[in-house]
Image (cartoon, helix red, strand yellow):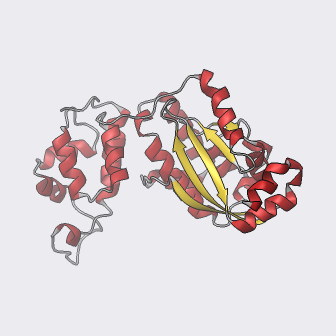
């Protein structure tokens, strides 16, 4: 099966850059080659080509985004040589048009998504679209992040709003994780001019985002600890769970499940949210 992009397609360029970044992170001894003492970190292009069973020039063209027809078999072989994990492998296949990427859901689905986020009260929940624009957020999520969350873009807030940055105990780790998750999620949108514009604006407005995006890391990160320092709650810890809307491609529901001290703090500080918090704390 051949891929679906041309030599000028941004997906081909992104695929090549991603493979080059991953190649730089593989140690020769990981793939049975001598480490050597006078060489740059990572594998050489010709080594990847040899191990994957493809021509050196052909592999060079792939990394340069010039290859017009790359088969699934070749990409599978290259993925194996580069020791790609399942998330990285899935990202490669989406770039090559061999796996389903996100689609943009109908705006008519917004009311349903808002109802679902509200149903998670008294705990925080919000939903984002394929570009991580926040299209629904319940009252607890707004109290946690501030009114800025309503109608905002999560990545823009994370990298350009100092008040949001201050909410995270280890902002650098959360920022790196967010960029890796967004890259994995947006693999099917790489040839979108809207994505190019969005990423370009963020790279200009945040040097940290620019560096993280240039690293080409991808991550699943669907379940992770979110450690925060909140002006009302104090130290607040949540298990963040991200769920895909299978009926509305591109949307993700983010649920923040607090540990017991955070539940108690929510009950004390946000008592005006009513009986649901007391019930949640007493479960």
Q: Position of residue 217 (x, y in %)?
A: 43, 54
Q: Position of residue 260 (x, y in %)?
A: 71, 66
Residue 1 visible (yes or no): yes
Q: Is residue 267 left or right of residue 85?
A: right
| Placement of 214 over or under 231, stated as above or below | above
Whether residue 186 is situated above or below residue 178 in the rendered picture:
above
Nearest the viewer among 182 and 86 is 86
Q: Nearer the viewer, residue 236 or 276?
A: 276
Residue 135 showing in the rendered view: no
Query: What residue is at 58 percent from the left and 40 percent from the top?
Result: 132
The C terminus appears in which quarter of the rendering? bottom right
Say whether residue 153 is left or right of residue 88. Answer: right
- Measuring from the top left, give residue 13's x and y in whole percent: 34, 39
Query: How many marks overall?
Result: 0
Tell me which residue sits at (18%, 37%) in the image: 71
Q: Quadrant of residue 198?
A: top right
């Amino acid at each position: 099966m051949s891929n679906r992009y041309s030599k000028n397609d941004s997906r081909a360029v992104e695929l090549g850059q991603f493979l080059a970044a991953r190649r730089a992170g593989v140690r020769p001894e990981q793939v049975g080659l001598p480490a050597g003492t006078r060489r740059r970190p990572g594998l050489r292009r010709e080594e990847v080509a040899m191990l994957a069973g493809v021509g050196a020039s052909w592999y060079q063209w792939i990394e340069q985004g010039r290859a017009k027809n790359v088969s699934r078999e070749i990409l599978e072989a290259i993925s194996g040589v580069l020791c790609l994990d399942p998330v990285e492998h899935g990202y490669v296949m989406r770039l090559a048009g061999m796996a389903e990427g996100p689609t943009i859901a109908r705006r008519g689905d917004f009311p349903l998504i808002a109802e679902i986020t509200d149903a998670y009260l008294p705990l925080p929940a919000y939903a984002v679209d394929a570009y991580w624009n926040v299209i629904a957020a319940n009252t607890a999520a707004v109290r946690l992040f501030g009114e800025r969350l309503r109608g905002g873009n999560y990545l823009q807030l994370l990298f350009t709003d100092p008040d949001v940055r201050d909410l995270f105990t280890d902002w650098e780790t959360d920022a790196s994780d967010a960029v890796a998750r967004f890259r994995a999620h947006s693999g099917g949108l790489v040839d979108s001019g809207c994505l190019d514009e969005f990423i370009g604006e963020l790279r200009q407005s945040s040097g940290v985002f620019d560096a993280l995006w240039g690293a080409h890391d991808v991550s699943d990160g669907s379940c992770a600890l979110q450690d925060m320092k909140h002006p009302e709650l104090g130290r607040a810890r949540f298990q963040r769970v991200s769920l895909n809307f299978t009926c509305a491609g591109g949307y993700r529901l983010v649920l923040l499940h607090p540990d017991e001290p955070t539940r108690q703090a929510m009950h004390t500080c946000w008592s005006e949210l009513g009986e649901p918090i007391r019930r949640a704390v007493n479960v």
